[in-house]
Structure formats: structure tokens, C-alpha cells
Image (cartoon, rainbow, N blue to C red):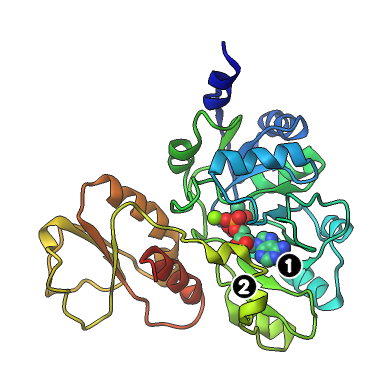
């Protein structure tokens, strides 16, 4: 078999695993793949991650290839304890307080990197992002691998992040070594990313699964918007993200449907059931967290369903997961 054929399609092993009580034989097989420089997709509480040994530059390089990800977009290093994070980044008291209070949680903290972290993992930056995920499969995998695991979301770059095994399999089968099937995720949107490099000025780089108000309560200060210069330090925010292949139209409660939209060929998702238009596809969520959990998987289902577009309700609320949900919706709509 030619080398290039081998590179273009590899055998992907898949294994189901109970997320509440992971089978350690399966975990150690996946951990062996990480230790030997391979790629393993695994569930976290937010979305599935595409993991490699964060300290092995050759392994990390494979992540960028499998995803088609721009190489200046840095990765999050997943750790299984606060002390493991302290070994690879320069903690300060405020960041430590957040980590001790919340982790494991959908909260990623950007801090000055120590030399152990290869430049490729942090996209050439002097800082690195760390997070301890709240999922027993993820935590046992990191522990068994004995190294921090670098992992972006396990989707092709630009697609919606995968929130179940089927979505990971769709995007990654034949491109990676191993997929751990831990069922559907709990949160559904990615972690909140904050920059604590300067402990006197905490920056919100990406709203997400950890609500802003909980972080601000513990920090006893507001999370600031990065100025245009420092937002260059969160390169991920530069790229178009989270979009299905069909157009995403934002709908505000009380508004009419835009005239150019034909409900009979459209799908809708949201919290309200608008009486004034009848779409061919419709999914209603009972709460903002339910909405966040379903957003990406319904994007994928609707794009497969031959709809002309998907109409998405804008959440009016400002607390909890609303900020992260609005961010993902406006990015998907190309705003
Ligand atoms: O929930 C999540 O965060 C998921 C799961 C798998 O943990 N991961 C995830 O990774 O969403 P990714 O690569 O799709 O998004 C990471 C974000 C990007 O916006 C990236 O630019 C930012 O974190 N980031 C990583 N390192 C950074 C750094 N040193 N400085 C600024 N931003 C950084
Ligand atoms: Mg992503």
C-alpha cells in the first residue's frame, strides 16, 4: 500500500464507553494511542474533543491536519488536576482561585506558558489555555495517558462542534486512530475562555459553557472585552465557525418572517412556537440550557434534511448560557 493512501485513510477504532463508569481496559487502550503519538476523539461535558499528547509536537501537528485547522489557532490543554495545570503554565492567585473553585468545569484559562508546552500547541504564542473537563471519560483518559491532552473540538474546521458520537464519526472516521463513544454531551457549547495573563484585568475571550456572572462573582471584578489588539491573541475568534452548510436566519420574538423565506422548505429552532409561520421542520427547546445542548446537533440534522435554511430564534435573556448561545448563533449566521 502506498504511503499516501495510508495517510489519506486510516483505520479508526471506535469503542462505546459508559461516561459515569468508564471501563478502564478501554481507557488504557485509548491512552496507549495518545502516548504513542496518535489521535483520540473523546467526550467532554461541552463538546467532543480531538486529543493528542500536548507535549509531543509531532502528535499535535496531526490534529491540525485531521481538522484542516489553521496552524496559528492555538489549542486548549486538558488536564486532570489543578496541580497538573500549574506544572505547565504560570498560575497567579486569581486564576488559581477560579480553578480551585470551579474545575472540573467548562472554564478555560489563558496564562503565561512554561517552556514544556511546544510552540505548535499554543500557536506560537507566549501564553497557553488550560482546562480540566467535567467528564469522567475525559479525566480518566488524561490520567491514564500521564500527559496533558491538547484538544480542539472534534469537527472539521468550520463545521458545528460535535455533541454526539455520530457527529464525530461523520467528520473524523478514517482520519484519526480512535473514537471513544460516550454518548451525548451535557452542555453542548464549548467552554468559556478567559485570559488571566494580567490578574488585574480579566478578559472574556469566548463566552461559553460557564456563565460570566459565576466567574465575576468569584473574581469580584468584571470580565472585560479584549481591545482589538489583544483579541489578536485569541486567534480562534478570527475564523468563521459553527456553521451548517445551509444558511442560518436569526429570528427575534414578535417579528415577521423575512419575505424571501418559504416556511415550507425551511426548518426552525427556538424556545417559542411562533403561530404565524409553519415550517417544515421544527424543534422547540424547553430552556436556554436545553437550547445550548441541542443547537449544534440540530444544525447537523437540519443540514442533512434538505431544508433551504434554518431559522433560529434569538434568545432574549442575558444570564446563564445565553451569552455563549448568542455568540454561537451569530457566528453560525455569519455575523
Ligand atoms: O469546550 C471546549 O473548549 C472544547 C473542548 C474539547 O474542551 N474545545 C474547544 O477547542 O472548543 P477549540 O480549539 O475549538 O477552541 C479553543 C479556543 C480558540 O478560540 C483558541 O483561539 C482559544 O481557545 N485559545 C487557545 N489557546 C489560546 C491562547 N494561548 N490565547 C488565546 N486564546 C487561546
Ligand atoms: Mg472548535
Among the 4 quarters of the image, the one containing residue 199: bottom right
Q: Is residue 282 visible?
A: no
On the rendered structure, is 260 left or right of 107? left
Q: Residue 258 location in percent, x, y?
A: 17, 74
> From the image, which quarter does the N terminus lie in?
top right
Q: Nearer the viewer, residue 252 or 18?
A: 252
Circles 2 and 1: CB atoms closer than 8 Å: yes
Q: Where is residue 88 in the image (x, y as percent from the top left)?
A: 85, 56
The residue singled out by tag 2 in the image is 205
Q: Residue drawn 36% across and 54% down?
A: 244
Going from N to C along the chain, the mark reached first, 2 or 1, is 1
**Looking at the figure, which quarter contains the C terminus?**
bottom left
- Front residue of 36/132: it is 36
CA separation in Å, label 2 and label 1: 9 Å
On screen, 279 above or below 211?
Answer: above
The secondary structure type at the circle numbered 2 is strand
Residue, disc 1: 110
Amino acid at each position: 500500500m502506498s504511503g499516501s493512501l495510508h495517510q489519506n485513510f486510516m483505520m479508526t477504532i471506535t469503542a462505546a464507553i459508559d461516561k459515569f463508569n468508564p471501563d478502564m481496559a478501554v481507557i488504557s487502550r485509548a491512552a496507549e494511542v495518545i502516548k504513542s503519538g496518535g489521535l483520540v476523539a473523546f467526550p467532554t461535558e461541552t463538546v467532543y474533543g480531538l486529543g493528542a499528547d500536548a507535549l509531543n509536537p509531532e502528535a499535535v501537528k496531526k490534529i491540525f491536519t485531521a481538522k484542516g485547522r489553521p496552524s496559528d489557532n492555538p489549542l486548549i490543554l486538558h488536564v486532570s488536576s489543578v496541580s497538573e495545570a500549574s506544572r505547565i503554565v504560570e498560575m497567579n492567585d486569581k486564576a488559581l482561585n477560579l480553578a480551585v473553585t470551579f474545575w472540573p468545569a467548562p472554564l478555560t484559562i489563558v496564562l503565561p506558558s512554561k517552556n514544556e508546552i511546544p510552540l505548535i500547541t499554543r500557536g506560537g504564542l507566549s501564553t497557553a489555555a488550560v482546562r480540566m473537563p467535567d467528564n469522567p471519560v475525559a479525566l480518566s483518559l488524561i490520567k491514564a495517558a500521564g500527559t496533558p491532552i491538547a484538544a480542539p473540538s472534534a469537527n472539521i474546521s468550520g463545521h458545528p462542534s460535535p455533541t454526539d458520537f455520530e457527529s464525530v464519526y461523520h467528520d473524523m472516521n478514517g482520519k484519526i486512530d480512535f473514537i471513544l463513544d460516550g454518548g451525548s454531551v451535557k452542555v453542548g457549547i464549548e467552554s468559556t475562555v478567559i485570559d488571566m495573563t494580567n490578574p488585574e484585568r480579566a478578559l472574556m475571550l469566548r463566552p461559553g459553557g460557564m456563565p460570566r456572572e459565576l466567574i465575576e462573582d468569584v473574581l469580584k471584578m468584571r470580565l472585560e472585552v479584549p481591545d482589538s489588539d489583544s483579541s489578536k491573541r485569541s486567534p480562534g475568534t478570527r475564523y468563521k465557525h459553527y456553521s451548517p452548510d445551509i444558511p442560518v436566519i436569526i429570528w427575534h420574538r414578535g417579528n415577521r418572517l423575512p419575505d424571501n423565506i418559504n416556511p415550507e422548505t425551511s426548518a426552525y429552532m427556538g424556545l417559542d412556537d411562533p403561530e404565524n409561520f409553519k415550517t417544515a421542520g421544527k424543534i422547540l427547546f424547553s430552556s436556554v440550557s436545553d437550547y445550548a445542548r441541542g443547537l449544534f446537533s440540530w444544525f447537523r440534522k437540519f443540514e442533512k434534511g434538505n431544508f433551504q435554511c434554518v431559522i433560529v430564534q434569538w434568545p432574549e435573556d442575558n444570564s446563564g448560557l445565553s451569552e455563549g448561545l448568542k455568540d454561537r448563533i451569530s457566528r453560525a449566521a455569519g455575523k
